[in-house]
Image: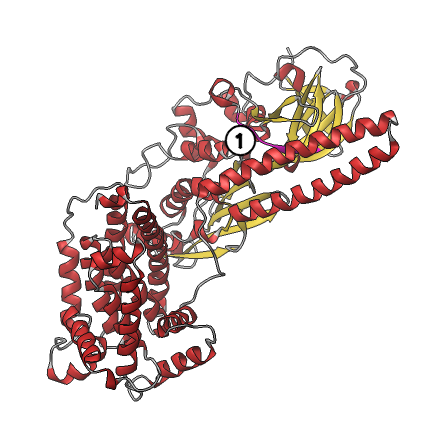
């Protein structure tokens, strides 16, 4: 295994193995969940068989024998399921999920270069028991004929190779291919000496050609139209349509591609390459802004009209190309939310069993796309919110029936795009949040006083569950009651420049609402002036901008507010919040109304400088902890401006933070 680190090409092969296996395991987990409720779906069984079959072969190639061994056993069970020698039941699904979990663990250990053995003997025993209950052993006489086409042992494959190579006259003309023959060819290929395969990888095409020729002869020799007529027809049609195939192996690959239900055609791109391209795109945006600034300056001064016209045309062209590059790069980073949701069915199933509750999962909007970097960071928060819904939210079957509810609880995952943001909702139709219970616990833990509790809104009470160490659970379980998790969820969401809000009605439902930017790289910003400094406010958070009269401001509970139509709007004087000088023109100010979820805050600024596309740059370790700032950017004139962290600013305002100005 150490050769993987010594040979660049083999290392690339190893990386490809890790990526492909991880994708197959994700597919297996999802397919097993579907199989539980669609036990007669033959196409689904075939797809699961092929997934395990591929993992078995590739892990054997890579020398990960532990993965190959357990996968081979699972493959045998699936083979009997698709032959109808076994019937899908809860026990079989449970054991196959155990196999999936072991493979996931083993793959993680391979990634970490940890090849110490693990003990999965109990799972192997469970697989063996299932296999034994399936009927007669595979070597019984009445199954000998069938085994000639589907047997996975190396001896069978070697004898097939020898038979064809020793008697070329057996090969007469191209024929049709059954699924069993395809599996046989796959196995023959996979069982070729590992070292010879490595020779192929590093550039020796001789072995590859021989394998292709040998497998072609096997396919031509092994025919059984009667037993698998349907599979033959599929293969025949696929091969006849494959005008460009240069070998039967390519034709067979096209058959497998048609049979397997896959998504849109994709290519794997190293995330580092995408990041590098994204950085270049960002620099191009900065350059474009600089040229635009120069063009405007020349135009205003009226110099060299013809030159100005040409420069403006060039600027327009660069602007168009830059926007196209930016869009293309951003689309490369976008993935469907379905990738985030794919673990949810398994999790709901396991939690249902653990709590002895009947819980259904409903998924909506899984085609909505979001930045890959955000998806990766959302995994842990989603896991905890789902656990919280199953433990705290959904009632027991008896309790639900006594309340006149359906016996089965429902957890719904929903996603939709709103402008330049994505909104995720996790809803359960359970008991809802008990505001009195939350307040009692918060007072008991001295998070708030009795006086503060009396003045809190329903939404503010809900936000208390995000306080560190807060829990209303009377029983400590593996899932809840330890006072950790919800505060971490909120922190993770805020790190993504998003917010989490709650809607709930006691006895009916609870919904966690997560609002996030579609991307963390390039955004539209509203430029404002505070004192002598310029700042950028993310446009996705801006509701409206209004001029106002200082005399209209008054205070409630020592906080400045203004009546905006029928609403009372809390205000933040940005010069005080940012510790800057007083505004020079107090009668010529603006309120930038920003909103996060259901919360609205008015930011008092001195001047509006316009709208611009901005590239978000990190503040680094030195300024990264400054409250209210999300990052920085460079304008067209070369000036550096800070980007306002609207979610954090709104949160500080509604939490009565000392950082927000109060009226004395």
Callout 1: few (<14), some (14-19), or many (20+) C-alpha neighbours within 10 Å? some
Query: Image quarter for residue 182?
Result: bottom left
* Rendered location of residue 192, percent (x, y): 21, 64
Q: Secondary structure at mark 1?
A: helix
Quarter the C terminus occupies: top right
With respect to residue 30, does 644 lie above or below? above
* Front-lying residue, 501 or 489: 489
Is residue 328 visible to the viewer in this orientation of the structure?
yes
Answer left or right for 486 relative to 352. Answer: right
With respect to residue 83, does 170 lie above or below? below
- Residue at 68% across / 19% down in the picture? 555
* Rendered location of residue 444, percent (x, y): 39, 24
* Rendered location of residue 39, percent (x, y): 33, 71
Answer left or right for 82 relative to 419. Answer: left
- Residue at 33% across / 48% down in the picture? 9
Counting every numbered tag in the picture gives 1
Q: Residue furthest bottom?
A: 226
Answer left or right for 270 relative to 591. Answer: left
The span picked out in magenta is 612-618
The residue identified by callout 1 is 460
Q: Is residue 68 magenta?
A: no
Query: Image quarter for residue 388?
Result: top left
* Front-lying residue, 323 or 459: 323
* Rendered location of residue 333, percent (x, y): 51, 46
- Residue at 46% across / 44% down in the picture? 375
With respect to residue 186, does 141 lie above or below? below
With respect to residue 442, does 311 lie above or below? below
Q: Is residue 614 magenta?
A: yes
Is residue 597 visible to the viewer in this orientation of the structure?
no
- Residue at 79% across / 18% down in the picture? 551
Answer left or right for 439 relative to 48. Answer: right
């Amino acid at each position: 295994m150490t050769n993987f680190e010594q040979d660049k090409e083999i290392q690339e092969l190893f990386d490809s193995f890790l990526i492909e296996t991880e994708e197959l395991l994700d597919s297996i987990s999802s397919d097993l969940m579907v199989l539980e409720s669609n036990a007669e779906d033959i196409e689904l069984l075939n797809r699961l068989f092929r997934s395990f079959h591929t993992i078995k072969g590739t892990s054997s190639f890579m020398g990960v024998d532990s993965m190959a061994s357990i996968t081979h056993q699972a493959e045998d069970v699936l083979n009997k399921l698709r032959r109808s020698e076994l019937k899908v039941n809860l026990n079989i699904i449970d054991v196959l999920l155990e196999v999936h979990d072991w493979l996931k663990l083993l793959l993680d250990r391979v990634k970490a270069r940890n090849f110490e053995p693990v003990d999965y003997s109990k799972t192997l025993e469970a697989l063996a028991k299932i296999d034994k209950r399936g009927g007669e052993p595979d070597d019984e006489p009445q199954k000998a004929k069938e085994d000639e086409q589907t047997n996975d042992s190396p001896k069978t494959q070697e004898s097939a190779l020898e038979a064809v190579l020793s008697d070329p006259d057996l090969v007469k003309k191209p024929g049709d291919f059954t699924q069993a023959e395809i599996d046989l060819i796959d196995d023959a290929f996979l069982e070729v000496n590992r070292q010879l395969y490595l020779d192929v990888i590093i550039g020796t095409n001789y072995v590859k050609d021989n394998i292709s020729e040998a497998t072609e002869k096997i396919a031509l020799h092994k025919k059984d139209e009667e037993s698998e007529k349907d599979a033959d027809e599929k293969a025949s049609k696929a091969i006849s349509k494959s005008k460009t195939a240069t070998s039967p192996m390519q034709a067979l690959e096209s058959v497998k591609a048609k049979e397997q239900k896959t998504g849109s055609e994709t290519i794997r791109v190293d995330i580092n390459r995408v990041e590098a391209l994204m950085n270049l795109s960002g620099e191009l945006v900065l350059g474009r802004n600089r040229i635009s600034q120069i063009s405007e300056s020349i135009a205003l001064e009226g110099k060299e009209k013809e030159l100005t016209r040409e420069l403006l045309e060039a600027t327009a062209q660069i602007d168009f190309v830059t926007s196209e590059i930016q869009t293309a790069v951003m689309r490369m980073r976008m993935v469907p939310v379905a990738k985030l949701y794919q673990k949810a069915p398994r999790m709901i199933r396991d939690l249902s069993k653990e709590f002895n509750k009947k819980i259904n999962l409903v998924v909506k909007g899984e085609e909505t796309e979001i930045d890959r970097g955000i998806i990766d960071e959302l995994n842990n928060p989603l896991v905890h919110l789902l656990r919280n819904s199953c433990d705290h939210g959904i009632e027991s079957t008896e309790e639900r029936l006594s309340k006149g509810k359906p016996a089965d609880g429902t957890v719904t995952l929903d996603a939709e795009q709103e402008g330049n943001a994505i909104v995720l909702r996790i809803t359960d139709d359970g008991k809802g949040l008990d505001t009195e219970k939350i307040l009692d616990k918060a007072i008991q833990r001295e998070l708030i006083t009795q006086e503060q509790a009396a003045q809190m809104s329903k939404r503010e009470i809900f936000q208390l569950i995000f306080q560190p160490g807060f829990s209303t659970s009377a029983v400590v379980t593996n899932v809840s009651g330890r006072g950790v998790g919800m505060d971490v969820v909120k922190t993770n969401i805020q790190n993504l420049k998003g917010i989490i809000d709650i809607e709930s009605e006691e006895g009916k439902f609870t919904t966690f609402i997560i609002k996030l930017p579609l991307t963390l790289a390039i955004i539209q910003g509203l430029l404002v002036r505070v004192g002598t400094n310029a700042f950028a406010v993310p446009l996705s958070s801006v509701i409206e901008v209004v001029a106002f009269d200082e005399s209209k401001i008054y205070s409630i509970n020592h906080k400045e507010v203004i009546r905006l139509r029928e609403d009372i709007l809390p205000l933040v004087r940005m010069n005080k919040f940012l510790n800057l000088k007083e505004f020079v023109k107090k009668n010529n100010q603006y309120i930038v109304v920003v909103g996060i979820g259901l919360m609205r805050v008015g930011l008092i600024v001195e001047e509006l400088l316009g709208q611009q596309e901005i590239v978000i740059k990190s503040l680094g370790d030195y300024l990264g902890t400054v409250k209210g700032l999300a990052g920085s950017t460079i304008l067209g004139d070369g000036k550096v401006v800070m980007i306002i962290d609207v979610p954090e600013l709104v949160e500080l305002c509604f939490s009565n933070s000392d950082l927000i100005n109060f009226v004395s």
